[in-house]
Image (cartoon, grey):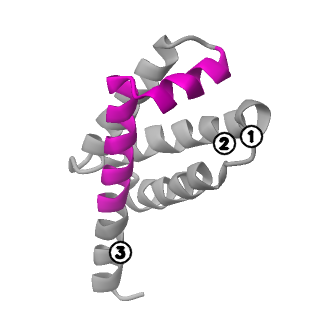
Amino acid sequence: MTPTGRKYGLLAITAFLTFAFGAAGLSKLAGVEMMVATFDAIGWGQWFRYVTGIIEVASAILIWVPGKQWIGAALLVCTMTCAVAFHLLVLGPSLIPALVLGILAAIILIARRPV
């Protein structure tokens, strides 16, 4: 891949992740009914929904901050790893979106990791 292609590819992935996690995190923080029900099914209490929402929104911002992008991406990889686990163990078979988002976050993590 050319340097220009890599640059715009990473930019597109970053923009997509920002939209996805910004929207998901804000819906968790706003108490959207589906999110409340999902976290009820997990069984850890609604505090976990708030923590997850804060992590998602903060990470969506951090992946744009020079020198901090890897931190935001690492938080998203961890969050999506947990999401995949919860889908496998508790919520059911709809783990593909979490898996794809986790892979995209891992791409940003690898590309932006400190040298």
Callout 3: SS: helix
Q: CA distance from mark 1 to mark 3?
A: 32 Å
Question: In the rendered image, which quarter contains the C terminus?
Answer: bottom left
Q: What residue is disc 3 on? A: 9
Q: Is residue 114 magenta?
A: no
Task: Please tell me the numbered disc located at residue 84.
Answer: 2
Classify mark 1: residues with Cα within 10 Å, few (<14), some (14-19) or many (20+): few
Point 49% across, 60% down: residue: 104
Callout 2: SS: helix
- Where 103 sits versus 23, above or below? below
Q: Earlier in the sequence, mark 1 or mark 2?
A: 2
Foreground pick, 70 / 33 = 33
Q: Are marks 3 and 2 in contact (CB under 8 Å)?
A: no
Q: Residue furthest right?
A: 89
Q: Are marks 1 and 3 in contact (CB under 8 Å)?
A: no
Point 28% across, 67% down: residue: 11
Q: Amino acid at mark 1?
A: Gly
Main SS type for the magenta part? helix
Point 69% across, 33% down: residue: 86
Q: Amino acid at mark 2?
A: Val
Q: Which residues are magenta?
A: 15-43
Q: Amino acid at mark 3?
A: Gly
Q: CA distance from mark 1 to mark 2?
A: 10 Å
Tell whether 25 sits left or right of 87: left
Q: CA distance from mark 3 to mark 2?
A: 25 Å
Q: What residue is disc 1 on? A: 92
Q: Earlier in the sequence, mark 1 or mark 3?
A: 3
